[in-house]
Amino acid sequence: MEVEKNGGQEIEAPKNITIKGILGLLMANTDGNGDAKKVISLGMGDPTAYSCFYTTSAAQEAVVDALRSAKFNGYSPTVDEENSWDFDFRTEIILLVWALAGYLSRNLPYELAPDDVYVTAGCTQAIEIALSIINRPGANILLPRPGWEVDLSAVENLADHNTVAMVIINPGNPCGSVYTYQHLKEIAETAKRLGTLLIADEVYGHLAFGANPFVPMGVFGSLTPVLTLGSMSKRWFSWRLGWLVTNDPDGSLKSPKFVERLKKYCDICGGPATFIQAAVPAVIEGTQEVFFNKTINILKQNSDTCFQKIKEIHCISCPHKAEGSMALMVKLNVSLLKDISDDLDFCFKLAKEESVIILPGVAVGLKNWLRITFAADPCALGEALERVKLFCQRHSC
């Protein structure tokens, strides 16, 4: 994985369309197809459209119970109110951070405290808060580009005195990589040498089904401070409730100034609906391991299907089979196609002719690559890949 530096005092509007924007345009391009093929989207990592990825009954019942109780129709307590531990009608929401701290401590060599956990409206808001609290004039952050491992020599060459953090995504989106324990340790040691904070996006945490088990970056919190970002939405296929966690047993992220800044951003941004927050302890406690195992088995089966089916399509290739998350990247060889100019052209014509949505690689910084999301019903996935095969045959040189 290569890295690029992103920083500076001036903020400009994005020049490129967003991933959701591109997917929206692709979806619109399927309208009016004469053969009335059902649209199959392999472009967005939201599997909830398929019954095989419905959330657990324990989650549904917990949310219904919280809503019907009529106790959680008001505002969430502010972070300061949470720390006062006033056991009034807000007590059950306050217990949320205790439940999350316990859940997120399961794979760590130390116990998280409730005040290490900040609740957010999904992982996206956690990312926004993390970047906001470390921002300063002239600062830069080392961001990952799609790949299988972090190029640590490139990291050290790019870092300078204005580098405030480096970001990792594990399990990886869009490549489906899962870092080894040793590689994560080397990342932490590099961050320590550079004196930079580590921001670990672990929204796909525990969705690993290959040779490498998922290892939380917080395991190395004693080596270097880690901000861990995550969400319930991927593992539970449920509502957008996320978290920002300070994995920092030595307390370097406990300075009053940093904590006050973090609390203020959380209060400004708000959080998830209160009844969702209230349901989380029961969701965590009531979800059986069989639910998670079923998810892993389906994702592994779909990953294997993708890898094998792609071998049958002459103009695309997959360098690595996905071992985690819900997506993989495939290389598009446009020289083998007679009327396709690039990945964007490929995806728009595919949507128009076959009603299959795939994300062009240019959306994640890789021109003439494609991102295929395999979090779909296995039958729908197989049909979509067969349509891609037919499309490529029609456009073959």
Image: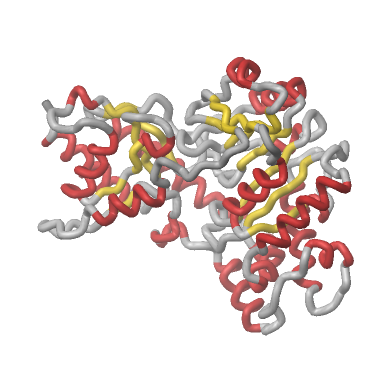
* Numbered disc total: 0
* Image-based side of 64 in relation to 387, left or right: right
- Regarding residue 53, the answer to whether it shows in the image is yes
The residue depicted at 30 percent of the width and 48 percent of the height is 357
From the top left corner, tell me how far across and down residue 25 is, in percent: 30, 52
* Image-based side of 105 in relation to 327, left or right: right
The residue depicted at 33 percent of the width and 54 percent of the height is 24
Quadrant location, the C terminus = top left
The residue depicted at 42 percent of the width and 36 percent of the height is 328
From the top left corner, tell me how far across and down residue 363 is, in percent: 39, 39
From the top left corner, tell me how far across and down residue 224 is, in percent: 78, 31
The way the protein has been coloured in the rendering is secondary structure
* Image-based side of 11 in relation to 46, left or right: right
The residue depicted at 85 percent of the width and 47 percent of the height is 257
Q: In the picture shown, does residue 224 fall above or below 190?
A: below
Q: In the picture shown, does residue 283 fall above or below 322?
A: below
* Image-based side of 19 in relation to 206, left or right: left
Q: State the residue lying farthest toward the front.
A: 10
Quarter of the image holding residue 181? top right
Quarter of the image holding residue 85? bottom right
Q: Which residue is nearer to you in this view: 144 or 96? A: 144
Q: In the picture shown, does residue 113 fall above or below 197?
A: below
- Regarding residue 379, the answer to whether it shows in the image is no
